[in-house]
Amino acid sequence: MDLEKIKNAKTVYLGKNIIYFNEINSTQDYAKQILKQNIKTGSIVIADYQTKGKGTKERKWLSSKEKNIMMTIILYPNSKPLKLEGLTVEIAQAIKNAIYKLYKYNLDIKKPNDLYLNNKKIAGILTEATSIKEKVIHLYIGIGFNVNEESFSDEIKDTATSLKKEFNKEFEIEEIIVTILEEIEKVLKERKLVSE
């Protein structure tokens, strides 16, 4: 993965600090483990492969090596919980905007946290937060996006898809990450979850 390309995103916060793994159990779990290390807001944990990728409701997020997007954005919003209401849907909209901007493909949002293409799931968002005394201190936005995935287990082959499966060509993962980060940062700025 070309990390320099991701760092060149037109963002102020997101993706300027990247913690990269060839393989990890879960980017979301790791993001929670490293908070004491003074990680900058907007840092992303990204991996080519997860052994224990997480979806919502403790479901597994299955993915092949170096084929898809598996990342977690770390934020310190220091805001009231109310400020996060509806955020996951807005993140989904930002991802939808990114894909349309790049390729003119229209994804569908299945509220609150999934994106579909041709009635099959292509991406999921896992938003988690920790609060202290009515203040959200840490916010983790986990994103799994099937980009160049070709093989799906029997369990999900009829309900999951990828860009490659639908359009029969390879896509550049870094280009998609960059555009997703740029679109998500707009949402975070509008909500004042990152400073201007």
Image: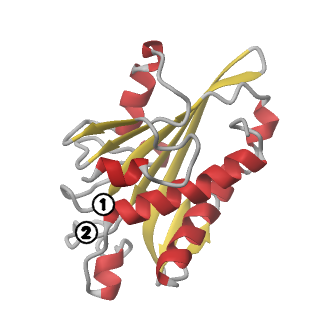
Q: Name the quadrant containing residue 18.
A: top left
Q: Are marks 2 and 1 in contact (CB under 8 Å)?
A: yes
**Badge number at residue 149:** 2
Query: Please, what secondary structure does the residue beneath circle 1 have?
Result: loop
- Report the front residue among 111 and 150: 150
- Report the front residue among 148 and 98: 98
Q: Position of residue 178 (x, y in %)?
A: 45, 58
Q: Earlier in the sequence, mark 2 or mark 1?
A: 1
Q: Position of residue 31 (x, y in %)?
A: 42, 29
**Badge number at residue 120:** none
* Disc 2 crowd, CA 10 A, few/some/many (<14, 14-19, 20+): many
Q: Is residue 20 visible?
A: yes
Residue named by callout 1: 68
Q: CA distance from mark 2 to mark 1?
A: 6 Å
Q: Position of residue 146 (x, y in %)?
A: 35, 65
Vertical order, 14 against 149 (above or below): above
